[in-house]
Image (tube, rainbow, N blue to C red):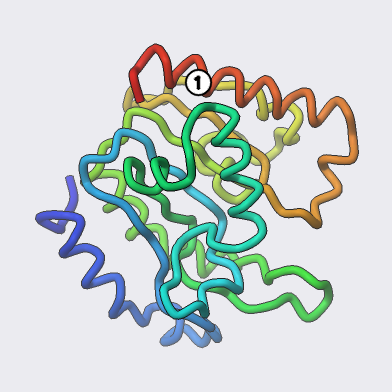
Amino acid sequence: MSTYPDIETLHKHLAQCRRCAEAGFRIESTPVVSGKQSARLMVIGQAPGIDAFAPNPRPFGGDSGARLFRWMARVGWSEEEFREKFYITAVTKCFPGSDPKSNGDRVPTVTERRLCRPWLDAELALIQPEVILPVGRLAINLFYPPKLKLIEVIGDHKVDEQGRIIVPLPHPSGASRWFNEPRNVARLELALYRLKLLKEQLDL
């Protein structure tokens, strides 16, 4: 049960969150989530990207989002329809900054994930989605054992203890080497096929 009466109230409190900053982490944006409480499907990403600095930030608003929505178009949803109907959030809600050791974004620490977890739990309690798409390793690990490799879970789907259907997807980063392997691409194709079947069966 959520401690917030509705998703709008949760969003107002989330926008004022200072947990990570007070713990000493340099957080480079305000929280970025979107969607309505009536959503039947929830996307859980890893963390907002650099596009969180845009005048009107929204989840998956950059290059990774463009790739994700190309996948969703193959399932049968336009980006506009997808954003209108479903809820999009992440393991951590703020852009964590760039990784000084690479060209990508910094991976949120275990502590940051722990500090942010109550927000995700509250979102799940309020929305009660029928289908969850965890996108990327950090989100997938919320529902699958961390020891499993991506190729062992992408293309799979399961029903968790709350009766929610979990369909994991790889992170759509253009820098990911995971997509260089034909067998990995085949697993993605299977995941999108399963998602298309669910769309038809559940009238999503």
Q: Quick one: 199 or 107, which is closer to the camera?
A: 199
Q: Quick one: 159 or 62, which is closer to the camera?
A: 62
**Horizontal and vertical percent for residue 193?**
60, 19
Residue 84 versus residue 25 in the image, above or below: above
Q: Residue at x 29, y 70 (%)?
A: 14
Residue 97 versus residue 199 in the image, above or below: below
Side (left or right) of 11 relative to 110:
left
**Horizontal and vertical percent for residue 140?**
58, 41
Q: Quick one: 133 or 36, which is closer to the camera?
A: 36
Residue linked to disc 1 = 158
Q: Residue at x 70, y 24 (%)?
A: 189
Amino acid type of the residue tagged 1 in the rendering: Lys
Q: Residue at x 45, y 71 (%)?
A: 57
The quadrant in which residue 1 appears is: top left
Q: Residue at x 45, y 18 (%)?
A: 198
**Horizontal and vertical percent for residue 139?**
55, 47
Residue 6 versus residue 198 in the image, above or below: below
Q: Residues within 10 Å of mark 1 (few under 14, many from 20)?
A: some
| Callout 1 secondary element | strand
Q: Of all residues shown, which one is farthest toward the right?
A: 181
The quadrant in which residue 104 appears is: bottom right
**Horizontal and vertical percent for residue 128?**
26, 37
